[in-house]
Image: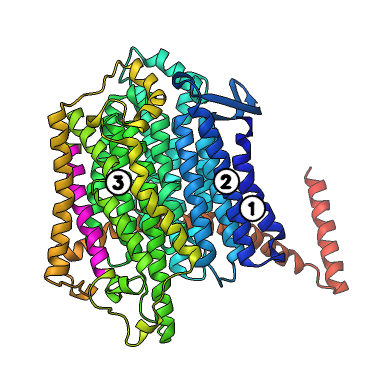
Amino acid sequence: MDYAILMILFPLLGVVLNGFFGNRWSGKAAGILASTMIGASFVVAVMITMQLIGMDPHHRMEEIKYFTWIKVGGLNLDFGFLIDPLTTVMILVVTGISTLIHIYSIGYMHGDSRMRLFFVYLNLFVFFMLVLVLGNSYPIMFIGWEGVGLASYLLIGFWWEDQSKAEAGMKAFVVNRIGDFGMLVAMFLLFSHLGTLTFTEVFDAAAIKWGHHIGNATITAITLMLLLGATGKSAQLPLYVWLPDAMAGPTPVSALIHAATMVTAGVYMIARSNLLYMLAPTSMTVVALVGGLTAFFAATIGLKQMDIKKVLAYSTVSQLGYMVMACGIGAFGAGVFHLMTHAFFKALLFLGSGAVIHTMHGALHHVHDHHTDPQDIRNMGGLRKYIPVTFSTFFIATLAIAGIPGLSGFFSKDEILAQSFASGNMLAYGLGLAAAVITAFYMFRLVFLTFYGEYKGPEGSAEGLHESPKSMTVPLIILAFLAIVGGYVGLPIVLGENVNLFHNYMHPVFAHGQEVVHHHANHLSHATEWLLIGISVAAALVGIFLAWTIYRKQGKVALPDAAQAGIDKVLLNKYYVDELYNFIVIKPLIGICNFAWKIFDAGFIDGILVLGSAKSVRWIGGGVRRLQTGVVGNYAFMLAVGILVLLIAFLVN
């Protein structure tokens, strides 16, 4: 598996070639080159996965060390990769979904003057994401962690001429730095207590040091700091606020960041650190609570959003809450399984929304309308007859995220809910079930308002509605296929002991932690499992039925912002969380900065040290200058006075 290094070298090569030599070819050529590089990484990922599957299940882990990276004091770190089932799932998802998004971007970004630069940033993003999931230590993971933060800033604010887009990129960058602080503190504590930061060594040392002191304050502090990092990257309460604003970037960026890569980094980090969390029950409870509340809270906000991408953004936050909640109840495998299936249907939803926006742009351009918002679902309606491929694939993804049996989202969501019930954490189960109902409702609300009914765009613009090019629709079809079949690797255990292939494949990654704390999975009776499956399906059907009743049968339409009132207005304004942050954090911070600037910068440094010293020299110089008059008589008088003073001094002494 030494060739695993090729996975990160291919996208890096794409960055170099497009970045330094790309001005010699067209934007389309740059897109083809960038897509080829990521496709090559995907081929390597498949080869590594097949090789790992062929190994004995108990030995499916290989650590590859390339060179000595850091050797200072007691810290010895090699630059290397850790290849195990968790790694292979992540690299397949990252490279596979990214390849489709790159291909889609060739059509979506066609005509953009900075198309080549866009693909440089995309390749850079994937490079750092692969470093994050392949690294064999926390510091290497942190390099990728920071790298995707930088690349996301560049991509979200790609159209920086628009002030709001530039601010969205900055917001994502700043909020993630808060989580990064937690990551750094956790690494400092790990090295201080264990003397190493390499994953395998950390887990072995932690098992020895805290295996008989489960719930120790130190390991609890470490895992809570890691959780702080995860709340930033994976957009959990209270640091989720950057993700909805990140919709300001081009739609392929939304799909890349919010479906399979950056936002899953926190979930991956928690799953990778599963042994540490198993040693800290308090932290596990906090993780489950944060995840459950995030899943429910974000879902309620999605109920009243009018921007098609904002609906999907809050849906992403909610689904990430499911993944984090699964990790908090000890169902790490179920969390990673949902990470994988979510990548399929959420990438499809975002790219589908991009196709809708692309279509609306064409329609508005047809009538030279530059004022109507092409992303507002109140300007859509009836689009299914104009863009049938986009509609069909989007509808499949909606069924998947709603949890309809037979599609990928059903299998992973049902497993998380079942595991929550089995763990005895009824609060987590209740929050997850409520979020499931709301998710089905707001997703079908989105479908009905966008694709059904009468077209609500400007008069005459319907003539400009058309299906997207093949480069955009082919990735949609592939993702739709994955959204259908992707869940069959994780069939419910009620159907048989060995039918959940995903769980069996991932088991070695989490077995060590379970052995250390003597954790045994809670098994449900077949009757209970079937009952929970029925409840899960019923929750989805209730949400769909309510959406159909309100937006199809009753024909209700989304009201203008000014007409919203009560709880509708609160949800439309996202519980005023941004305004709360602005009042509690941003304004006081700006006030402190202004005070410090006036007192210390302008007052002390500029006023006293810089300007004060300059004025003192100027004043002294001005006084001395008056002595240099150029009049000889004055000089003779001053000489006489000086001699007189010297004589008096001599006589006195």
Q: Secondary structure at mark 1?
A: helix
- State the separation of the CA atoms marked 1 and 3: 34 Å
From the viewer's perspective, is the residue at label 2 or at label 3 nearer?
3
- The residue where tag 2 is placed is 127
Q: How many marks?
A: 3
Q: Position of residue 627 (x, y in %)?
A: 78, 67
Quadrant of image for the C terminus:
top right
- State the separation of the CA atoms marked 2 and 3: 28 Å
The answer to whether one can see residue 348 in this image is yes
Q: Residues within 10 Å of mark 2 (few under 14, many from 20)?
A: many
- The residue where tag 3 is placed is 409
The boundaries of the magenta stretch are: 429-449
- State the separation of the CA atoms marked 2 and 1: 9 Å
- The residue where tag 1 is placed is 15
Q: Earlier in the sequence, mark 1 or mark 3?
A: 1
Left or right side of 62 for 653: right
